[in-house]
Amino acid sequence: MLGQYQITALIPARGGSKRLPGKNTKLLGGKPLIAWSIETALASQYIDRVVVSTDDEQIQEVARQYGAEVPFLRPDYLAHDHASSFDVIIHAIHFLQLDRPNHLLVLLQPTSPLRSTAELDQALEFFMAQQAKGVVSVSKTEHSPLWSNILPENRNMAEFIRPEVQGKRSQDLAQFYRLNGSIYIYDTLSLLAENKIFFTEQVYAFETDLENAIDIDTALDFLIAETVLRYRSVE
């Protein structure tokens, strides 16, 4: 609990994964991928409940072994490729009866296993300090998007570099940030009212370390996360 808020961490973990099969139970640093997010949430000084939403009985079993609640298996309409994250969130809010005042939902995707409990708690404290409706984690972009562009069919680069960056050094350009998918914190009634993950003047960016914000979607991402963990173990 933080201030007047009851806080539930929701970890969504579907069984099917085409790019990296079985990724949510794949061993990373000796434990299932999903276990990293569960343990981070359980270690928080503010989170009251840690709930996993899944359609998969193996994920359900693993999540319970690591201390999470798995009070339901997702209905069929949420168990396919086209089900949105927001549909999963709304289902959980209603099932867990979080559709009441003074409830926060913290969405922790299991594909961001390296986030720290310290960052999570700081993000919650930031939510309170800002009197926010939402807080979303971001990281600095590795490269400025101003060096990126679409290409025409013949792939000529005549218009590739925008005039406003011609002749400039990277360090002369404004710093850009990107959503990193690690932490989403929202007031549940505001989510229901907006009926979407929303970004308004009452939603604030919380910067997290790039290394902690690795998002695992492919085998290469998994290898990068393993490399970071090995590096940390010998520091």
Image (spheres, rainbow, N blue to C red):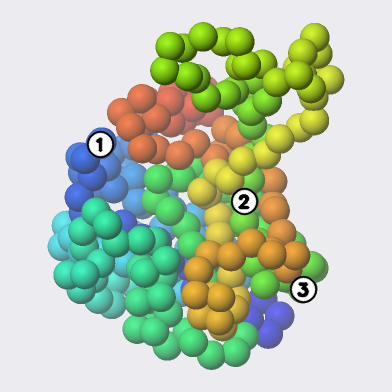
Residues tagged 1 and 3 counted as in contact (Cβ below 8 A)? no
At x 49% / y 27%, what residue is drawn?
228
* Number of marks: 3
The residue carrying mark 2 is 137
For disc 1, the marked residue is: 20
Mark 2 is on which residue type? Ser
Image-based side of 221 in relation to 124, left or right = left
Horizontal side, residue 78 vs residue 163: left or right? left
Q: CA distance from mark 3 to mark 2?
A: 16 Å
Q: Residue at x 33, y 72 (%)?
A: 69
198 up-or-down from 104: above or below: above
Q: Quadrant of the N terminus?
A: bottom right
Q: Residue at label 3? A: 131
Identify which amino acid the numbered label 3 is placed on. Answer: Gln
Tell whether 114 sits left or right of 136: left
**Callout 3: 10 Å neighbours few (<14), some, many (20+)?**
few
* For marks 1 and 2 on the same chain, the one whose residue lies earlier in the sequence: 1
Kind of residue at badge 1: Leu
Q: Can residue 84 be seen at all in this image of the molecule?
A: yes
Residue 162 image-quadrant placement: top right
The furthest residue to the right: 172
Disc 3 is placed on an element classified as loop
Q: Around disc 1, counting alpha carbons within 10 Å, would you say few (fewer than 14), some (14 to 19), or many (20 or more)?
A: some
**Dots 1, 2 in contact, CB < 8 A:** no
